[in-house]
Image (spheres, rainbow, N blue to C red):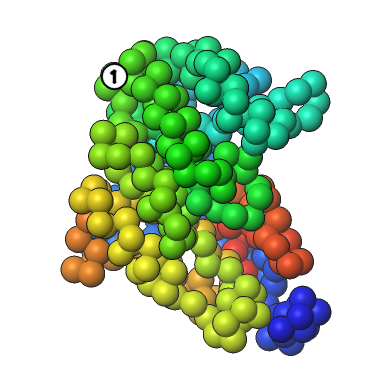
Amino acid sequence: MTRREMMAGAAALGLTVSARPAFAADVSVPPGSLPFGVYDPDGDFADLSGVVIEHLFLPWEDVFLPSLNDADSYALERNRALLVTLEPWTWSRSERNTAQYLRRGIERGEYDANMIAVADVLATLQSPVTLRFAHEMDDKSGQFIWSDWNPDDYIAAYRRMTDVARDRAPKINLMWSPLGDENMGDYYPGDDYADIVGLTVFGLQAWDQAKFGRDQTFDDIFAPRYARAATYGKPVAVAELGYVGNQSYVSMWRDRVRQELPDYPSLVGVSYFNQREVYPWPEGFGAPDWRIKNQVLT
């Protein structure tokens, strides 16, 4: 199927790519009993009960570290733990550097100071903290400069940086967080470097229809990824979750993602990505708006 055919098919089905709302959806925690977290820069979930994890994203260069203290206070007021996704973006003047530059810099210890600066703040926080470093390393799309490396190189870099982090902040937990593709096991850093395994699950109805000719369910995407993750005997979480489509599609996903089922005995929680997509999806599908308040309900 060509890109033009995919886009035409999506349009014919009345599916959106970037999800502009017909009207604003109610912001609420999905039904169920699994622990629920959220990356919520707009503060839509600030006053809602049922959220137990506050998810943060930050680079390790050009970051205002006192923002972590602010996040800690925010989480404490709401009885939430912190999940901190640390992205090792590197910069050269105004441009990002290459994967080779990052890899060599880590090998030479040039980024130890970056991790030390972050970890020293993490060590002072009162909330429980889980560090998710250099996630989705098995992704081949090219959006992250730390992804699709030689596995041995990635594992060495991950171990070095998380050793530095735990040396400075020994109480933190580590989340090893692949996308969940078939090659994820090549990047497993070892049991001592993964307290929990985090996976990524996004449902975009336009993509489903164009690629598969039908709507995919949460289980269609999650089940094979969970099966791979469960082999390590660690707790498993959905570290990033989002879904966009028509009312039927959104309801199908919303009503499923927090259900506890015997098929997933190691699943301990899900965290929703309540923001626009940062990186455009391939083949012209744009940047979906995952925010619950902007979901299409038609």
Q: Nearer the viewer, residue 267 or 165?
A: 165
116 relative to 288 in the view: left or right: left
- Residue 229, compared with residue 205, is above or below; it is above
Residue at image point 42% right, 74% down: 220
The C terminus sits in image quarter: bottom right
Q: Is residue 49 left or right of residue 243?
A: left
The image position of residue 281, as x and y in percent, is 68, 60
Is 295 placed left or right of 229 in the picture?
Answer: right
Point 54% across, 23% down: residue: 106
Q: Residue at x 53, y 23 (%)?
A: 107
Position of residue 112 relative to residue 138, above or below, is above
Give the residue pinned by disc 1.
170
Q: Give the x, y percent position of residue 149.
A: 55, 43
Whether residue 58 can be seen here: yes
Q: Residue 126 at x, y = what percent? A: 32, 20
Q: Is residue 36 visible?
A: no
Q: Secondary structure at mark 1?
A: loop
The foreground one among 252 and 189 is 189
Q: Quadrant of residue 13?
A: bottom right
Q: Is residue 187 above or below residue 171?
A: below
CA neighbours of label 1 inside 10 A, class few (<14), some (14 to 19), many (20+): few
Which quadrant is home to the N terminus?
bottom right
Q: Quadrant of residue 83?
A: top left
Residue at (79%, 21%) from the top-left corner? 93
Amino acid marked by disc 1: Pro
Which residue occupies the foreground of this view, 25 or 224? 224
Please state the horizontal and vertical placement of residue 69, each as a whole percent of the image.
Answer: 46, 18
Residue 20 horizontal side relative to residue 39, left or right? right
Q: For the image shown, how many numbered marks are present on the structure? A: 1
